[in-house]
Image: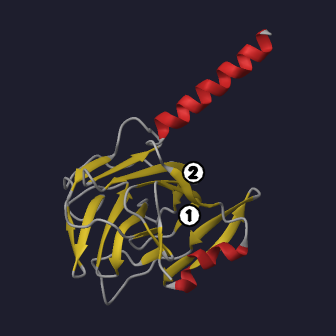
Amino acid sequence: MKIICSAFLSLLLFDFAIAQKFPEGYMLQYKQDFNNGKSLSDFDFDHRANWGIFSGNGNYFLQCTSASDSLTKPDLPSNTAILSNKVFGDFILEADVMPVMDSGGFGEICLFLGIKDDSKYYFVQLANHSDSNRHGVYVVKNSLPKKITEDFAEAITWKEKKWHHVRLERDIVKRTITVFLDDMKNPVFHVKDYELVMGMVGVGSFGSPCRFDNISIWSQTVITEE
């Protein structure tokens, strides 16, 4: 009887934890662990030749293999992997991320949301250096980025060759964007902006090599664009 009661209590606690983690009505709308070569077909890539599925220690992941300096749009992220044909309003995205440090020790990754087209969207850059041009949340309008967080927010401390866990929360009613890294209680960024509502989502970097794995997206609804 004690074993049965313990099992029932554990199940209740598990359900409570899930309920606390996601708002009521949220369902898993997309999940990708990149264990199948066909998973690349889920995404539209800028600089497609830079992206591929790689493995390490028996684990498969999506990787951008080289830096891309965009000559046409130098102020915008140039490595993008955008989830095709899925439009989200409110959502929560979680993923494992690993920037690849350059020779100067700089590392960064980007998350994209609210994408209307390649000239209008939001992006989040998480970087281990913070200044007026790096590390923040940006809104892009007419291909011009505007930083909507503080210029010198506390930078990220990346552990080289280690996976980090990121969580991106988008609330279109409150117009908030909240970003967590590893610590799911204290956000790296929390900002309110009224420019954009629904759009596509994606991952990438401003120009650095980077890795992504175990991407999951929860939402009440998702609109499929054909």
Q: Residue at x 34, y 82 (%)?
A: 118
Earlier-in-chain disc, 1 versus 2 = 2
Q: Residue at x 31, y 72 (%)?
A: 121
Q: Residue at x 65, y 72 (%)?
A: 39
**Total marks drawn?**
2
Q: Amino acid at mark 2?
A: Trp
Q: Pick whichever, 7 or 96, lies toward us.
A: 7
Task: List x then y, in percent, for residue 195.
Answer: 20, 66
Does dot 1 land on a helix, a strand or a loop? strand
Residue on which disc 2 sits: 163
Residue on which disc 1 sits: 211
Q: Pick whichever, 37 or 208, lies toward us.
A: 37
Does dot 2 land on a helix, a strand or a loop? loop
Q: Quadrant of the N terminus?
A: top right
Left or right, 46 with respect to 153, comes to right
Residue found at the far top of this picture: 2
Q: Amino acid at mark 1?
A: Arg
